[in-house]
Image (tube, rainbow, N blue to C red):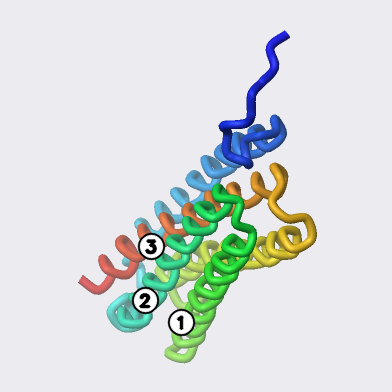
């Protein structure tokens, strides 16, 4: 019977369970693509139905959206550095850059909450029009995913402090970075097809 050699494999792939978990997460990502694809489809249909309410040009503050974009894309870069440190068995580096990713994600979320408050203050609520209903649903769903990711990162930091880098914690870290990069890709589509297209 052949014995599998895990010596040259990254830590997250050194257990069969870790490999299965990562594969399973790719299936989850496919389902998430379908979810966000549906939300984009709904927005593309309802995005011009204003019902005498405000339009994109009336409520979007592109400067703030640019800051949100920089924060989230930078957090994707720091998430990549987390994985780089993990592959070098640098626990301290993993934790430091995971905290940086967490802080950038928190900054993004803070700005998104302020964005929603701004919309409501100018009379743009979910009940105002089909456009705003689809906008709040799309942005809110993405924001909820970011919120979940932040709590996930906090739990990972706690596990890393207690257990260190093991095949199990490495697998979880790898899956988290995949999730975080996915959220950044979704945001690029939101930034392009919702915000930029909305003010042009």
Between residues 101 and 146, which one lies in front from this camera angle?
101
Picture quarter containing residue 157?
Answer: bottom right
What is the CA distance from the residue labelled 2 to the residue labelled 1?
9 Å
**Circle 1 — which element?**
helix
Residue at 55 percent of width and 47 percent of height? 87
User: Which is nearer the N-term, disc 3 or disc 1?
Assistant: 1
**Circle 3 — which element?**
helix
User: Which is nearer the N-term, disc 3 or disc 2?
Assistant: 2
Q: Is residue 108 visible?
A: yes
Task: Judge from the rendering whether residue 175 lies leftward or rightward of residue 192; answer left or right.
Answer: right
Q: Which label belongs to residue 190?
A: 3
Q: Quadrant of the C terminus?
A: bottom left
Residue annotated with mark 1: 115
Residue at 31 percent of width and 61 percent of height? 193
Residue annotated with mark 2: 65
How far across and how far down the image is residue 23, in percent? 60, 34
User: Which is nearer the N-term, disc 2 or disc 1?
Assistant: 2
Residue at 48 percent of width and 46 percent of height? 33
Rendered view: 168 above or below 190: above
What is the CA distance from the residue labelled 3 to the residue labelled 2?
10 Å
How far across and how far down the image is residue 152, in percent? 67, 61
How far across and how far down the image is residue 18, in percent? 68, 37
Label 3 neighbour load within 10 Å: few <14, some 14-19, many 20+: some
């Amino acid at each position: 019977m052949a014995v599998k050699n895990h010596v040259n494999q990254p830590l997250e792939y050194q257990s069969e369970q870790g490999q299965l978990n990562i594969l399973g997460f790719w299936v989850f990502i496919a389902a998430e693509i379908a979810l966000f694809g549906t939300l984009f489809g709904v927005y593309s249909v309802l995005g011009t139905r204003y019902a005498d309410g405000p339009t994109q040009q009336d409520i979007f503050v592109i400067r703030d959206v640019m800051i949100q974009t920089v924060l989230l894309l930078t957090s994707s870069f720091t998430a990549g550095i987390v994985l780089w440190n993990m592959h070098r068995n640098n626990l301290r580096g993993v934790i430091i850059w995971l905290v940086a990713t967490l802080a950038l994600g928190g900054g993004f979320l803070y700005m998104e909450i302020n964005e929603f408050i701004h919309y409501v203050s100018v009379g743009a609520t979910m009940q105002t029009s089909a456009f705003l209903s689809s906008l709040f649903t799309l942005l809110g769903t993405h924001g909820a995913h970011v919120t979940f990711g932040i709590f996930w990162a906090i739990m990972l930091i706690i596990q890393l402090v207690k257990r260190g880098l093991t095949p199990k914690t490495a697998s979880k870290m790898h899956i988290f970075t995949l999730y975080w990069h996915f959220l950044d890709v979704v945001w690029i589509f939101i930034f392009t097809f919702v915000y930029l297209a909305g003010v042009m």
